Amino acid sequence: MSGTKMTVEEVYNIVKRDIDYYKVSGGGLTCSGGELLMQADFVAELFKHCRINEIHTCADTSGFGSEKKMEKILAYTDLVYYDLKHMDSAEHKRLCGRSNDLILRNLALVVEKGIPMVIRVPLIPGYNDSDENITAIAKTVAELTKETPVNILPYHRYGENKYRMIDMKYQLHDVKYPTEKELEKAKHIIESFGLKCEISK
């Protein structure tokens, strides 16, 4: 374990160093994880500092946290990156350890609040890349809002070395990267529901 404990003010003082760059580039602060909902009070207060000083805020989340925590962060959020992995609740529990019920409730909450959002789908061959799952994701998003774009994030093994560094076994070592054909097929399914879709590189 390594790291530095910091207050909201200490983190914000680092963030604001680049405030001129944010204004020119249109960028700002993104909080991700782990899972930012595990530190909702801290993130909300940090985002509040940014909002007061007109720094754009982005919440990158799996959506797994209480609705109360989500609301706390959304109060000061300009953009949400929202991960969706599997639409079948039982399969989601098998793969991720928890059902997706709370995730889907929080997804609807973001839409209800009217906050711009990008859905991100980490596509992992053999786990969540079936036509049925991609169709279910697209259908779920389209029924909530057609204004929200979807980004497909192709599986990679960039984090494998990190597992090695902390003596953990990387469980997906034998999983192959999705092919261009498979990625384009998933993109086509999502677009067939009237949604904009991009494949991240």
Image (cartoon, helix red, strand yellow):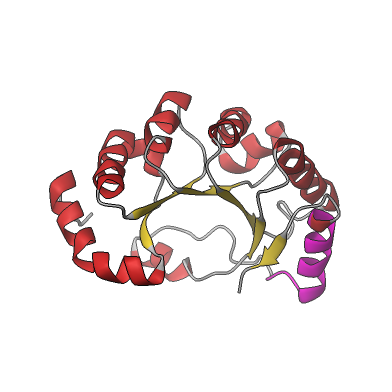
Q: What residue lies at 18% left-to-right and 61% top-to-bottom?
A: 14
The answer to whether residue 6 is seen in the rendering is no
Query: Is residue 24 magenta-colored?
Result: no
Stretch of the chain drawn in magenta: 177-190
Q: Quadrant of residue 40?
A: top left
Q: Who is closer to the viewer here, 185 or 26?
A: 26
Position of residue 126 measured from the top left corner of the image (x, y, whole percent): 74, 57
Most frequent secondary structure within the magenta stretch:
helix
Position of residue 26 measured from the top left corner of the image (x, y, whole percent): 41, 65
Q: Is residue 188 left or right of residue 7?
A: right
Query: Is residue 187 magenta-colored?
Result: yes
Q: Is residue 41 left or right of residue 60?
A: left
Q: In the picture, which quadrant includes the N terminus? A: bottom left
Position of residue 137 measured from the top left corner of the image (x, y, whole percent): 74, 45
Q: Is residue 163 above or below residue 115?
A: below
Q: What residue lies at 39% left-to-right and 64% top-to-bottom?
A: 27
Q: What residue lies at 70% left-to-right and 36% top-to-bottom?
A: 144
Q: What residue lies at 58% left-to-right and 41% top-to-bottom?
A: 96
Position of residue 198 measured from the top left corner of the image (x, y, whole percent): 68, 65
Q: In the picture, which quadrant includes the C terminus? A: bottom right
